[in-house]
Amino acid sequence: MNTPPSGPTITVGNIALSFHRATAAVTRRVLEAHGHRVESIEAPHEQLFRLQAEGRVDVLVSAWLPSSHHTYLAAYRDQAHLLAPHYQPYCVWAVPPYVPAEAVREVADLARPDVAARVTRAIDGINPGAGISRFSARMVTAYGLDRAGYTFTPGTEAGFIARVEQGIADREWFVIPLWRPQYLNRRHHLRPLAEPKGLLGTVDAAAPVIRRASLGHIHPEALARLDALHLGNDGVEELDAWINTDGLTPLQAADRYLAAHP
């Protein structure tokens, strides 16, 4: 960890969400440990993949495949090398734990008149390029929720988090498009709803994407370590909680994690 940077500069890009910053910080520390200087860049989902396609990002952390990000990677897949996945993300719709399971067990239950009368029908999400946002927009129509007055509106990460925190504080019945890993799962024990139509995609593999043209510039031992790195959903949520609950920076969280998991 204390090796002075001496190797080629590597640009690590991440999607502009806190848990992606956390995993990118771990990647950065691994590269620095093998002598690389690292520049960091972050952008919304589709923009980040476009930057890598243009050659401006060496290592993208990470592509969720096949469900969420395949559509962005497909445009330059032949120019990309995938490492082994660092975790296994998936998308859900969830409700707070105080919403009774006998009242709301699956997505279709939201359309029942007695439930729709109680649940807030404005559903808030993160930016529109996220897989969970694309899936959620389709679900409102596919489950007939629009006919019951539900709407889905994408937004910012900060707005999304504030919406959950305020809803929990008010003991509000609401549904939130969510995913694992995300620290709110750990913080509030949000309960996933069954989604039998399969519109939220599969369990993905979160794989770092390296430009083939950049492979020769990365130290082989750094590549091997990144390829062997498995954070798991629990590990990423731990990192995310340290940032959002404990107030650590992404690099401080990465240092804590790597010290605990050498």
Image (cartoon, rainbow, N blue to C red):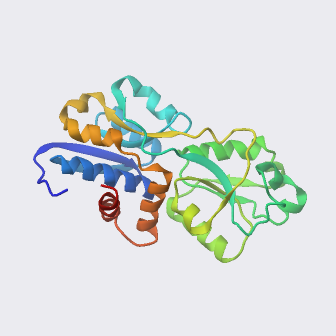
163 displayed left or right of 56: right
**Residue 17 visible in the current orientation:** no
Residue at image location 59% in from the left, 71% down from the top: 165
Residue at image location 20% in from the left, 50% down from the top: 32
77 displayed left or right of 100: left
For residue 144, above or below residue 164:
above
For residue 219, above or below residue 168:
above
For residue 174, above or below residue 37:
below
Residue at image location 50% in from the left, 33% down from the top: 70
Q: Quadrant of residue 191?
A: bottom right
In the rendered view of the protein, which quadrant contains the C terminus? bottom left
Residue that lies at the very extreme toward the top in this rendered image: 78
143 displayed left or right of 244: right
**Which percent across, then down, holds residue 134?**
61, 43
**Residue 8 visible in the current orientation:** yes
Residue that lies at the very extreme toward the bottom in this rendered image: 169
110 displayed left or right of 15: right
